[in-house]
Image: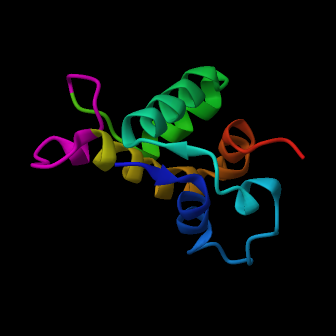
Amino acid sequence: MLIPVIMMTAAMHASSPKPAKSSACAKSNIVKLTPADTLQRLDDFRTSLPASDRVQLDRALPRSANGGIAQCDAVKGSRASCEAAAYMPALRSTGLMPRFLATICPKP
């Protein structure tokens, strides 16, 4: 299953207090990511964060003993889909969403 970035970014901005601005990312319909690819990008982003930002994100997104995202431990379906989706509110609540989007959106 592929997740078009345009749909993913629209969902990421759906609960934002401000309307999403038109961008190359929002207009792109050719860049597609699988749930596993999305999760890999999210994990890579987390790893690249300075320690203080990573701690802040980890507080918003508790991990289980095996390193996975705790809220997805009992998931019956795709764990990658669950974990990728779990990142979204954590990125929004920590203010890290714009920085993450900058890593996946094509540069104009």
Q: Main secondary structure of the magenta part?
A: loop
Residue 79: give x, y in percent of width and height: 23, 41
Residue 48 occupies quadrant: top right
Please, which residue is most extreme toward the right here?
Answer: 108
Let me know if residue 66 is in the magenta part.
Answer: yes
Residue lying at 31% horizontally and 39% vertically, measured from the top left: 80
Q: Is residue 53 above or below residue 72?
A: above
Residue lying at 30% horizontally and 38% vertically, measured from the top left: 69
Residue lying at 46% horizontally and 29% vertically, measured from the top left: 40
Q: Is residue 16 above or below residue 41?
A: below
Relative depth, front residue between 30 and 56: 30
Residue 64: give x, y in percent of width and height: 23, 32
Q: Is residue 55 above or below residue 2?
A: above
Residue 4: give x, y in percent of width and height: 53, 55
The magenta stretch is: 65-79
Q: Is residue 59 left or right of residue 44?
A: left
Relative depth, front residue between 8 and 12: 8
Relative depth, front residue between 27 and 67: 27
